Amino acid sequence: MSQISRVTRTKQDARFAYNKLSRWYDLMAGDFERKPRNAAIHQLAPGIGENILEIGCGTGQAIVKMAELVGRSGKIIGIDISNGMLNIAQARVRKMGLDGQVKLLCGDGMQLPFNTGYFDGILISFTLELFDSPEIPLVLAECRRCLRTGGRISVVGLSRKHPNFMTRLYEWLHSKFPLFFDCRPIFVQQSLQTVGFHTQSVIDLSMMGLKAELVLAIKQVSTKYINRSDDKLG
């Protein structure tokens, strides 16, 4: 996957930027992300009583939808690098009366503070491509560790699988203005398969000319990929 552009912005810069954007993020990116994100939730199909994690939960749009789907017996946990985004998400959760079903944490997807096999499903919506190339398999390996056997992961992100003019333009903008165009197209399905996920479905999307992939995959039993047994919060 050497064709993927690198991410040069630091985590501290990213946190600062999203803290500043948090109050306006839904106005700026809401329409662009809403349909693909809802499709990713539909593919994940959270069920009554399930434990679901969202990495990069942002302002909580997906969190409240999934909390309604898992019901009072389920649990939704959201993790995000930005306290500003989490404050917006917490206000949204509180307004919907979902405090008892939702837990929000400030943290990094590369080190998930949860027990092995704790989750039934994981959602990642336009977040995986924010990680630098060497970090992507580490994030997905952590996802795999935290999923139970048979658990699902639904990932939607900008795709480099079939690059077009808009893809290359976006990559050029990313290289010239990395503080503003911090994400870039990646190989979503290939990234999941690399760490041992089994693909269930792939949907190719187009958003204002930009290509995206929506991939649903599951964790299967494998002697090649052995989960760590260290205890973490969960």
Image: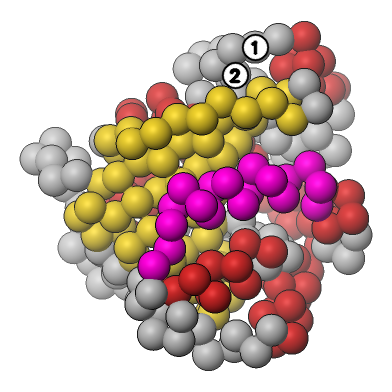
Q: Position of residue 225 (x, y in %)?
A: 19, 41
User: Judging from the image, what secondary structure is the residue with disc 1 in?
Assistant: loop
Q: Which mark is residue 22?
A: none
Answer with the quarter of the image where residue 81 lies. bottom right
Amino acid at the residue labelled 1: Pro
- Report which residue position mark 2 lands on: 160
Q: Is residue 39 magenta?
A: yes
User: Judging from the image, what secondary structure is the residue with disc 2 in?
Assistant: loop
Q: Is residue 109 left or right of residue 160?
A: left
Residue 197 or residue 214, whichever sits in front? 214
Q: Main secondary structure of the magenta part?
A: helix
Give me the residue at 83% from left, 62% from top: 22
Whether residue 184 is situated above or below residue 228 in the rendered picture: above
Residue 73 or residue 174, whichever sits in front? 73
Q: Position of residue 176 (x, y in %)?
A: 85, 22
How much space separates mark 1 and mark 2, taking CA atoms? 5 Å
Q: Is residue 114 visible?
A: no
Give me the residue at 53% from left, 36% from top: 214
* Residue bounds of the magenta highlight: 30-47
Q: Position of residue 175 (x, y in %)?
A: 78, 21
Q: Is residue 61 left or right of residue 70?
A: right
Answer with the quarter of the image where residue 159 lies. top right
Give me the residue at 50% from left, 43% from top: 155
- Report which residue position mark 1 lands on: 163
Q: Is residue 68 visible?
A: yes
Give me the residue at 53% from left, 54% from top: 41
Residue 162 or residue 146, whichever sits in front? 162
Asked whether the beta carbons under mark 1 and mark 2 sit within 8 Å of each other, the answer is: yes
